[in-house]
Image (cartoon, rainbow, N blue to C red):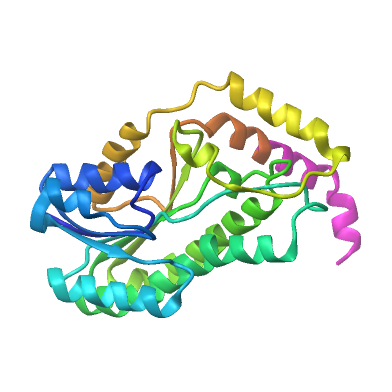
Amino acid sequence: MSKVWFVTGSSRGLGRHFVEAALSRGDRVAATARKSLNELVDTYGDAVLPLEVDVTDKAAVFGAVEQAKEHFGRLDVIVNNAGYGLSGAIEEISDQQLRDQLETNLFGPIWVVQAALPYLREQGSGHIIQISSVAGLVGLALGGGYCASKWALEGLSEVLAQEVAGFGINVTVVEPGGYATDGLTGGVAATPNPLYDGHRKALVDYVAAVDFDDPAAAGQAILELADTPNPPLRVFFGQGHELVKQAYAERLQTWEDWKELSLKAM
C-alpha cells in the first residue's frame, strides 16, 4: 500500500531527493518549503501537496500538518529534514545566530511532531524520521551551534521513541555523513575572528579532500527505511561510521581511565 509522507525542507538537498524518491514510486507527499514547489505539481500532479511553510512559525507548522491530513486522509511517514548549518567558533557566533539555529533545527521538528502525533496516535501507526547528522554525535570545531541543535534533536528523539512506542509509532534518527548538496555552502557563517583561522583552513582542506556521497542514494535508502516493519532508533546514511566509532571508543576509554575519580564522588 502506498504511503503518505510529510517532508519539511523539500526544496533542495536531501529533502528534495526524499520527496522525489517517494513520489517516483507512487507514494503521496505533502512537501513543505519556504518557497514555491509548484514545479513538483507539474511533474507529479495530485500526488504531491506543496506547502509554503517556514518551520520557525509554529502556527504555520500546525496548519500545514492539519492541511496535509485533511487532504490525504492520513499521514504515514513524517520526515523532519528542514535545517541549515551555522559555521563559527563559539566565541564568534552571536546570540541571534544561535537562537535562529535552534528555532529551525530543533524547535521546527518539535512543532511538527507535536502537530502530527494526535493523527498518528489515532491511526495507531506512523513513522517519524528525524534528520540529524554525524555532527549530532561528534563535536566538530566551528560547528558548535549546529552540533548543539543536532545533539539536542538526538536526545529529544530518543525520549520521543520511548513515549510513543505504545501507540504503534516508530521513531528513527537518521545521521547523514557528507553529501554533495548545496547544504555544504548554504548555511550561515559568523563574523570571523582571525584567531580561529587555523580551524577554518582545516575545514576547507577537509571538504576539498572528501569524496562526498550521492544524495540520490539517500533518497532510495529512506524508502527502504520507511518500509521496514521494525526500524532502528538510529541509522547512518553514507559516511560516518568510523568517525563516530572512534569518538565513542575514546569516550569509553576516558570514562574508564577516570573511574577512580568518579567513585570518589559517590
Q: Is residue 126 left or right of residue 107?
A: left
201 left or right, relative to 38: right
Magenta segment includes 253: yes
Q: Position of residue 92 (x, y in %)?
A: 79, 52
Judging depth in this view, the residue of 208 and 128 nearest the camera is 208
* Image: 75 above or below 87: below
Relative to the observer, which residue lies in front, 223 or 10?
A: 10
The answer to whether any part of residue 124 appears in the image is no
Residue at the image position 26 percent from the left and 50 percent from the top: 226
Q: Give the vertical position of 37 relative to 67 (above or below).
A: above
Which SS does the magenta portion mostly show? helix
Q: Does residue 144 lie above or below 99 as drawn?
A: above
32 w.r.t. 215: above or below: below
The residue that appears at 50% across and 36% down in the rendered structure is 177
Residue 38 left/right relative to 188: left
Q: Position of residue 180 (x, y in %)?
A: 45, 31
| Residue 8 painted magenta | no
Where residue 111 sits in the image (x, y, percent)? 44, 73
Q: Identify the residue at image location x=67%, y=55%.
A: 145
Residue 136 % position (x, y): 58, 49
Quadrant occupied by the C terminus: bottom right
- What is the magenta range? 249-266
Question: In this rendering, does residue 156 appear at all?
Answer: yes
Tell me the quarter of the image containing the N terminus. bottom left
